[in-house]
Amino acid sequence: MGPSIPDTAPLPLDPRAVRPAASARDRDDAIRQCGEVLLAVGAVESAYIGTMLERERSVSTYVGEGVAIPHGTLAAKDTVRHDAVCVVRFPGGVDWDGEEVTVCIGIAARGDGHVRLLAELAEILLDPDRARALREATEVAEVIRLLQPIEEGEELR
């Protein structure tokens, strides 16, 4: 047997893709901003943004704890250049179909990479302390640290 591959790997998060203090008029504006960040770091082509809005119209990407994870439709995978995650924080909150969202984690993935990214994000967000810390993080480095896998036996500081 070869070397074992860890269950979790660091999320593909470019520091330029973290926006700790944004504001949005509404849900669609927030999604558009996430798409623009993914575009700015070269992860997607501009057409991907429209598919993020299309996905939201069919299924809400709100996941609870003030967090939404907007992403494109499966048909959009050809507009993804490389897997990426962005974090856009809306301290003033955004009305997300009756829920208040303060953190949007936009994802773009080729193939079925979005499944792995969603699973890793779910693991992080299932920890209420980590989800709260992410909602309150105002520094790029803090956001990046919170989105890294916690090693066995390591605790959130």
Image (spheres, grey):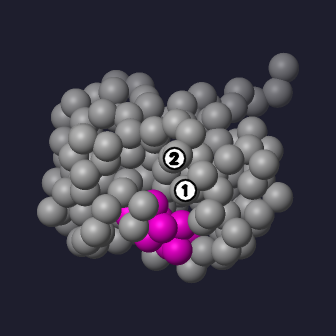
Percent across and percent down for residue 133 are: 20, 46
Percent across and percent down for residue 26 are: 31, 62
Q: Secondary structure at mark 1?
A: helix
Is 56 or 14 nearer to us in this picture?
Answer: 56
Residue 109 to residue 99: above or below: below
| Crowdedness near tag 2: few (<14), some (14–19) or many (≥20) residues, C-alpha within 10 Å | some
* Three-letter amino acid code at the position of disc 2: Glu
Residue found at x 19% / y 42%: 132
Main SS of the magenta segment? helix
* Three-letter amino acid code at the position of disc 1: Leu
Marks 2/1 in contact by CB < 8 Å: the verdict is yes
Residue ID for mark 1: 53
Residue found at x 24% / y 41%: 98
What residue span does the magenta drawing correspond to? 30-38
Residue found at x 30% / y 53%: 103
Disc 2 versus disc 1: distance between alpha carbons? 5 Å
> Quarter of the image holding residue 129?
top left
Residue ID for mark 2: 56
Residue found at x 75% / y 30%: 3
Q: Is residue 151 magenta?
A: no
Q: Is residue 32 magenta?
A: yes
130 relative position to 1: left or right:
left
> Quarter of the image holding residue 113?
top right
Residue 9 to residue 4: above or below: below
Percent across and percent down for residue 20 are: 28, 68
Q: Which mark is residue 114?
A: none
